[in-house]
Amino acid sequence: MSAARRGTHRRTGRTTPVAVSVMAALAIVVFSVPLLALMVRVPWSDIEDVVTSSASRDALALSLLTSVCATVCAAMLGLPLAWVLARTAMPGRSIVRAVCTLSMVMPPVVAGVALLAALGRRGLVGELLDDWFGVRLPFTTPAVVIAQVFVAMPFFVLTVESALRGTDRTVEDAARTLGASPAYVMRRVTLPAVRPAIVAGLVLTWARALGEFGATVTFAGNFPGTTRTLPVATYLALESDVDEALLMAMVLVVVSFIVLVSLRDRWTGALGGAR
């Protein structure tokens, strides 16, 4: 085969089929048109009034606080869970994984109802907390964090578990052969190897927690300064002031976009490595 034909063959092999390009363009349109419409409809001249209003500031501050707390809790609970799912031969592991990630796909309102059934004043656990300790979780700020953890932690668990399954255990085995304890191997060998996946899981978990609405409003309610997060405030604003709702929605989009873009190389690389 001549050099010219080989070059043509290589170029042809890298050419994307027309049908694939068309469908990819259609997918881009599906994602971009709603965001473009939001940007066009936003009354930018009023953005200072909305952003600086006490209601918007309180809702945004509460959203940022609770989403960060939820992400920390998800990491503390999700990392050991991901390790057990990836590295132990526990019976019924597939069932445990399904149960622990079910909240990721169930309707958010159903998640909120489930939390009420478990932690409400007459819930399975909530009644004991109320009777024994006088603790009432629903319609409080901790309830917001609990709702966010419940729906967002599966993103962290699945991402880190996939990375743990895909790591090369040769280095771990070598460290054990040299006398390293299991805890030392985990801390100094395994976790650094899956650090990009951990960062990816944290970013995805935070983004999901920041945008949580259904489970939050069902389990935590809508109390200004206590449980009214920015997604809840945005929904309520639709009933009285559409322009304000558009501005609040734009604030959420901008915050999420900045974080995702700034960490793009970390979380996309981690997801690629996890595969």
Image: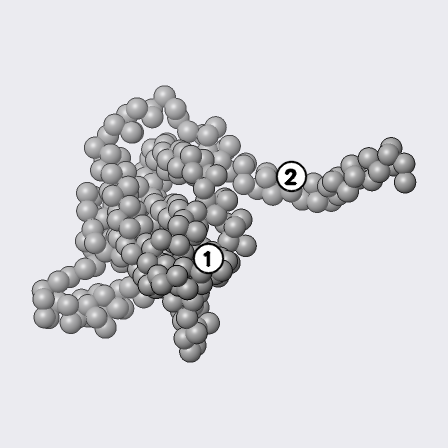
Circle 1 residue:
171
Label 1 neighbourhood size at 10 Å, few (<14), some (14-19), many (20+)?
few
Residue 240, quarter of picture? top left
Vertical relation: 123 (above or below) 78: below
- Viewer-nearest residue: 269 or 52: 269
Q: Amino acid at mark 2?
A: Ala
Percent position (x, y) of residue 39?
Answer: 46, 30
* Residue 104: assigned label: none
Residue drawn where x is 39% and y is 54% of the image: 189
- The C terminus lies in which quarter of the figure? bottom right
**Residue appearing at x 34%, y 55% in the figure:** 187
Q: Is residue 35 visible?
A: yes
Color scheme of the displayed model: one colour
- 208 vs 61: above or below: below
Q: Which residue is mark 2?
A: 25
Element at badge 1?
A: helix
Helix, strand or loop under label 2: helix
Work out how far the residue at label 1 is from the one at label 2, CA to CA, in angstroms: 43 Å
> x and y percent of residue 185 in the render?
37, 59
Place of residue 129 in the rendered image (x, y in percent of width and height, measured from the top left): 15, 68
The answer, for residue 246, to whether it is visible in the render is: no
Which residue is at 26% across, 49% downward? 69
Q: Say what amino acid the circle numbered 1 marks.
A: Val
Q: How many marks?
A: 2
Residue 251: give x, y in percent of width and height. Answer: 36, 34
Residue 252 lies left or right of residue 21; in this view the side is left
